[in-house]
Amino acid sequence: MSATQALHTDNQLFDRMRTGDKGALEILFKSHYASLCRFAKSILKDAEQAEDMVQEVFMKCWDKREQIQLTGSFKSYLFTAVRNHCFNTLKLNERKYWMEDGMEDDERLAVNDVVDHLSAKSLNENINKAIDLLPDKCRLTFQLSRFENMSYKEIAETMNVSVKTVENQMSKALSVLRTSLSPYLKDITMAFLLFFSF
């Protein structure tokens, strides 16, 4: 099946799901569940929590199916939704940590630690915004590579495209991101962390 056919099939199933077809939801769930779980696990570092995140995203997709507006493939929409849900959960846990435990140890509130924490949070938010602005295929390729640690060959098989196409999409994605995030790439260390340590 070609990438165009796969996108068309997913979006057709989504259109059926939008009208209340639970069978279409089940097909989409079975088709993407495993890869989404691997993706979520790469962010959360917890397999059980990753599965919960993916299931919650599918439930939200079902509940809000009439409000969802696709700008590309439903697969890309799912990966973006899972990524956002995972990051929101991490932020919530982090906020809870600071509220419940942060005051117990004065060393945790050292000025340098707080500054580092805020800088990292700001950088992460800007990275997410830049990724969201990538073209659909570039964004999905980048997410699979950086967040799911998939090889170009694995990405090519997942997206039903050639390895050369994956290489081109990654090159385009990195070029756009480097431009968008140029204020944050003032030294080689930051560039390395941003593009090779996701």
Image (tube, rainbow, N blue to C red):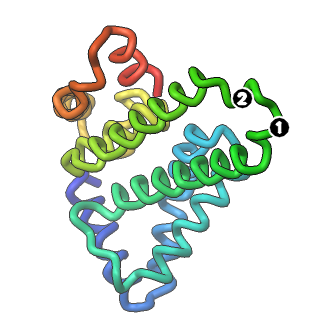
Label annotation for residue 26? none
Asked whether residue 156 is in view, the answer is no
Q: Position of residue 186 (x, y in %)?
A: 27, 15
Q: Position of residue 58 (x, y in %)?
A: 52, 70
Q: Which residue is at a point 57% across and 60% down the rendered structure image? A: 54
Whole-number angstrom distance, CA of label 2 to CA of label 1: 8 Å
Mark 1 is surrounded, within 10 Å at the Cα level, by few (under 14), some (14 to 19) or many (20 or more) other residues, namely few
**Type of amino acid under label 1:** Glu
Q: Is residue 113 left or right of residue 115?
A: right
Q: Image quadrant of residue 18?
A: bottom left
> Decide: marks 2, 1 in contact (CB < 8 A)?
yes
Q: Nearer the viewer, residue 109 or 76?
A: 109
Q: Nearer the viewer, residue 76 or 154?
A: 76
Label annotation for residue 104? 1
From the image, tell me which residue sits under label 2.
Answer: 108
Q: Which residue is at a point 83% across and 37% down the rendered structure image? A: 104
Q: Position of residue 20 (x, y in %)?
A: 44, 90
